[in-house]
Amino acid sequence: MWNTTIFFSVLMFVVAVRIVQHRDVDISNMAPVELSVPALPYLEPNDRLRPSNRINVRHVGEGDLIGPESLVVYDKYLFATLADGRIVRMQHENEESEALAWQTVAMTGTPGANCGQGGPSDSTQSEELCGRPLGLRLVSPSIMAADNMAQNTKILAVADAYKGLLAVDGILPGETGKITQLDTSACGELKLINDLVQTEDGTLYFTETSTRFQRRRIFYAMLDGRPEGRLLAYRRTEEGEEKCVVVMDNLFMPNGITVSHDKKSLIIVSGVQVVAVDLAQAAKAVQQKKPLPHNTLKPFISVLPGTGDNIRTFQHLPNGTQTKCYWLGLGSKYAQPFSLIKTLAPWPQLRWVMASLIPYEMIVGLIPKYSMLAVYDEHGRLIETLQDPSGYTPWISEAEMFEGRLVLGSWYNQFLTIVESL
């Protein structure tokens, strides 16, 4: 009994010391609960993303294309959001060259020497100043007032973790990029918006992964375990009024979002699962400004083999075979025989002690690096995975096809990845 008392006394003293040492990280926001997660699935391993004689995997723009979280292809251009606050436009240097060149279209924050240099934990504490654009979509000009548009051109909608919901026009060569802040004040403070999609009626639906933790401490939201994310909607009326509505709250870490193939549902990544929200009901919630009850949330993919990031709707597989499908970037592995998330799920106190004792950068480092892109059919059934167990290109956030090559984005990596010969 005495030894146990001494042990816990020392443990609490160490915890208190660590809290003081890391007082810039406010874990007082944490009140962990038991985390309900599905059983670990079996994952058939493969090496379809591992560099080899038959698979050419190139890292492009190392040290400059930092954290290319989200990707958009338009015509002969590839756009990406970066960790230093930039939105860049890429294209091949010429028709014969495989080399990519890139230019900055716009920056969501204020340029600075430390922008993008703080790593996953934002150790330089510069993201709030520089901006951290995450989800990116090509959208119709209806989200902007005509007198705010610098040019009558294509528009990019951006979910920035710190700057909010943004629209960017003037994105093509010869134009000047201009950022417009969209008014989401009716939805209250936005702590961490993450991804977005536009539906046919012009509404932008976007996810807020946490209402408590910012991007630089997003793993605390997982350790905390409380469902405190939201699904939000933004639209501009014909009269020019900007509306922001909470469509659903108390979601567990909503992240990537897309529209289903039949255009009847919003498909939303939630931790290691994917859920669906009926689009007609969502539109009604926007109209009535009344959040949907949780019993309207439907399962779409019961368990993912990794932590889900962005999801996109495609008409073909990565190898070009025509079929309706969804591509889903996965971060850490969530599969048999072991997952840190699964192990810690029933132990909220242990997760609190872990957050108290271990520096955030080390927590991120404890998660094994793994490369995986998962492809699901239009009904949510797994078609295939593309993996690299060596983690040469870890933490895949999103994938796109650009001029016949598979491009992999990542919020974590210091480069963009291009894969050939799938």
Image (cartoon, helix red, strand yellow):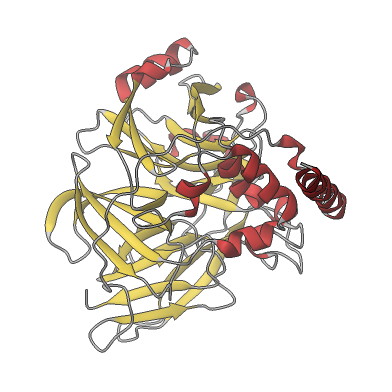
Quadrant containing the C terminus in the rendered view: bottom left
User: Residue at left 25%, top 28%?
Assistant: 264
| Up/down of 146 relative to 366, above or below | above
Quadrant containing the N terminus in the rendered view: top right
Front-most of 420 and 4?
4
Q: Is residue 5 left or right of residue 325?
A: right
| Up/down of 184 relative to 358, above or below | above
> Residue 418 location, x and y as percent?
36, 74
Judge whether residue 290 can be spotted in this image. Answer: yes
Front-most of 416 and 236?
416
Front-most of 263 and 43?
43
Furthest residue in direction bottom, as rendered: 53
Furthest residue in direction left, as rendered: 322
Judge whether residue 85 can be spotted in this image. Answer: no
> Residue 245 location, x and y as percent?
52, 21
Instruction: Tell me which corner region of the image, top left, top right, bottom left or bottom right, holds residue 375.
Output: bottom left
| Up/down of 239 relative to 52, above or below | above
Front-most of 340 and 282?
340
> Residue 146 location, x and y as percent?
52, 35
User: Residue at left 86%, top 55%?
Assistant: 21
